[in-house]
C-alpha cells in the first residue's frame, strides 16, 4: 500500500484518536522538549534533543503503520525487526502507541 502526501493528510484528519494531537498543533503550546505542529496541513511531532537541534517526525495514523513497517523491512539493508529498525522508523515517524506497535 503506497501512501501519497494527500492520503496521509486525509488519514491524519479522519483518525479520531489523533484529534487531540491536531488540536494541540493548532492551538499550542509550541515550546518545550516536544510539541506538535502543522506544516502545509501535515501533522508533525517536533522533538528537541539538544538546543537548536529539532527533529520532525510525521505523526502516523495507526492504519498506516503496517505500511511503514513493511517499507522499513523490505529495503535490502533493513535486516530483521529489532532495535535498529525500530530506531530507524522512530527517527521519521511518531504516533500514539507507535513504539509498542513496531
Image: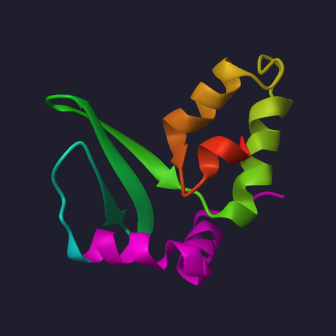
What residue is at 71 percent from the left and 47 percent from the top? 101
Range of residues picked out in magenta: 1-26
Position of 56 with respect to 31 (left or right) is right
Answer whether residue 2 is magenta in the image: yes
Q: Height in image: 65 above or below 47?
A: below
Principal secondary structure, stretch drawn in magenta: helix
Query: Could you say which quadrant of the image residue 35 lies in?
Result: bottom left
What residue is at 37 percent from the left and 68 percent from the top? 40
Q: Is residue 102 visible?
A: yes
Q: Height in image: 97 above or below 4?
A: above
- Judging depth in this view, the residue of 34 and 46 nearest the camera is 34
Where residue 58 sits in the image (x, y, percent)? 49, 52
Where residue 33 sits in the image (x, y, percent)? 23, 42
Q: Height in image: 64 above or below 47?
A: below
Where residue 71 sits in the image (x, y, percent)? 77, 40
What residue is at 74 percent from the left and 34 percent from the top? 72
- Total label count? 0
Image quadrant where one finds the N terminus: bottom right
Image quadrant where one finds the C terminus: top right
Where residue 75 sits in the image (x, y, percent)? 80, 27
Q: Is residue 41 visible?
A: no
Query: Could you say which quadrant of the image residue 54 lies in?
Result: top left
Question: How is the structure coloured here?
Answer: rainbow
Q: Height in image: 44 above or below 27?
A: above
Query: Could you say which quadrant of the image residue 78 lies in?
Result: top right
Position of 2 with respect to 41 (left or right) is right
- Judging depth in this view, the residue of 35 and 4 nearest the camera is 35
Amino acid at each position: 500500500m503506497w501512501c501519497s502526501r494527500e492520503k496521509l493528510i486525509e488519514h491524519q484528519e479522519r483518525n479520531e484518536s489523533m484529534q487531540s494531537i491536531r488540536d494541540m498543533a493548532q492551538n499550542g503550546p509550541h515550546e518545550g522538549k516536544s510539541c506538535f505542529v502543522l506544516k502545509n496541513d501535515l501533522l508533525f511531532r517536533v522533538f528537541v534533543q539538544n538546543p537548536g537541534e529539532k527533529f520532525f517526525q510525521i505523526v502516523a495514523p495507526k492504519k498506516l503503520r503496517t505500511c511503514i513497517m513493511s517499507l522499513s523491512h523490505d529495503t535490502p539493508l533493513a535486516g530483521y525487526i529489532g532495535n535498529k529498525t525500530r530506531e530507524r522508523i522512530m527517527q521519521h515517524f511518531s504516533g500514539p502507541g507507535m513504539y509498542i506497535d513496531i
